[in-house]
Amino acid sequence: MPKRTSDDLLEEIREAKGNLEEEKGGYSRLIALYRELRQQLRRENDRDLAKDVEKKLIYYLVEYGPYRKTVYRKEEKAAIDSLKQALHFEDHLPLAHYRLGLLYSRRRRFTEAGSHFSKAVEVQGRAERFPLNERQLYYAHLYLIASELHVLQDVHEKMNVLSVPGKYEPFSSSDMAGLYEKLQATESYLNDHAFLKITGERKEFLSKEEVEETLLHKKRGTGHLYVGDETIEVGFDGKTEEISRDDGKILYYLLQSSREEPLDAGVMAELTGEEGEVRSTTFRQRVKRLSRLLEEVGLTDVLAMERGICTFTAAVPFIIVHRADEQLH
């Protein structure tokens, strides 16, 4: 088989971007193609273009790494590997450190989690890309406190089993009880404020359990957009469809925007990480794809296209639920 050139790889990338919905493991393939293109350009000694592609690769590793999956299931390890690789290219990426901290926290690896939350806070002030928003920065501090309390609790328990003559006890039982209460209070706050529910103009924080209850018992005739840790879905009257991160961000914008701030090619480029404006043909294709997905859940003819502008026209109430620390646009 002839070796693929950089032009061949660019064409494959364009095709891969158009097939994220249909192709299982689409994000993984797209990331692999960008990685291969970077290497090929370096072999062709086109260092400037290789650097531009590296920036694009970093974007996909950070923005889409948590949504990577194999043919059968989401892969948490793939998400960790993606974020680590992004940091290998560029260490001053607060959002990458923050997301790694979350992933390590879920695995109860609190030393690594605390290290990444601390790094996210440290590099925030000098980061050129992927800074934390205000809520993420606030949560990073809370997660850092929780991680360090977990580590302290673990160290204290391990010290207790050591039989060392005249050993020093840094913390009394009452000290540890107070720290444990602080840990419980911090984790309760983070749990209770994990998600944000938007209904019209109203916003409220929900726990993961409350999210499941909300989506399970929502009224008929009401749509929902759910952006979770690894899954994005749209639903209406009992039907749901998992959608790509790009489509989720576009739909979120359509549901939140007004006729004064419509979706056009420039806005779509910002949402999907493109430079400048997406091509008019690409813009129309993405709108059509999203429209087909909405039809799958029973929302027909809800997107209107006119003079390069897309609007959500249906008089359907929508509930939007997303992680409170998620950046959607």
Image (cartoon, grey):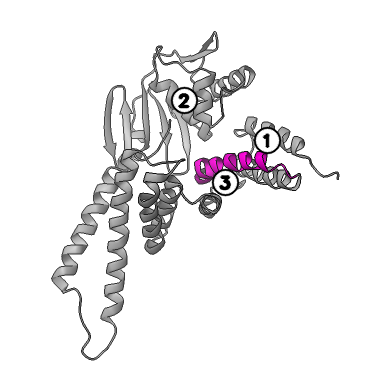
Identity of the residue furthest to the right in this view:
1
Residue 49 covered by magenta stretch: yes
Residue 212 picture location, percent across and down = 35, 40
The kind of residue on which mark 1 rests is Ile
Q: Earlier in the sequence, mark 3 or mark 2?
A: 3
Q: Secondary structure at mark 1?
A: helix
Q: Secondary structure at mark 3?
A: loop
User: What residue span does the magenta drawing correspond to?
Assistant: 45-66
- Residue found 62% across the figure and 46% down from its top: 71
Query: Considering depth in this image, is 229 or 3 the residue closer to the camera?
Result: 3
Q: Residues within 10 Å of mark 1 (few under 14, many from 20)?
A: some
Query: Considering depth in this image, is 299 or 251 the residue closer to the camera?
Result: 251
Residue 165 picture location, percent across and down = 23, 91
Q: Secondary structure at mark 2?
A: helix
Vertically, is 141 above or below 201? below
In the rendering, which numbered label is found on residue 13?
1
In the rendering, which numbered label is found on residue 251?
2
Q: Quadrant of residue 10?
A: top right
* Residue identified by numbered label 3: 69
Q: Is residue 256 left or right of residue 171?
A: right
Say how many tags the image has: 3
Distance from the alpha carbon under mark 1 to that under mark 2: 23 Å
- Residue found 54% across the figure and 40% down from its top: 59
Query: Considering depth in this image, is 156 or 141 the residue closer to the camera?
Result: 141
Can you tell which of label 1 and label 2 is closer to the viewer? 1
- Residue found 39% across the figure and 38% down from its top: 326
Residue 309 picture location, percent across and down = 51, 13
Residue 235 covered by magenta stretch: no
Distance from the alpha carbon under mark 3 to that under mark 2: 22 Å
The kind of residue on which mark 2 rests is Leu
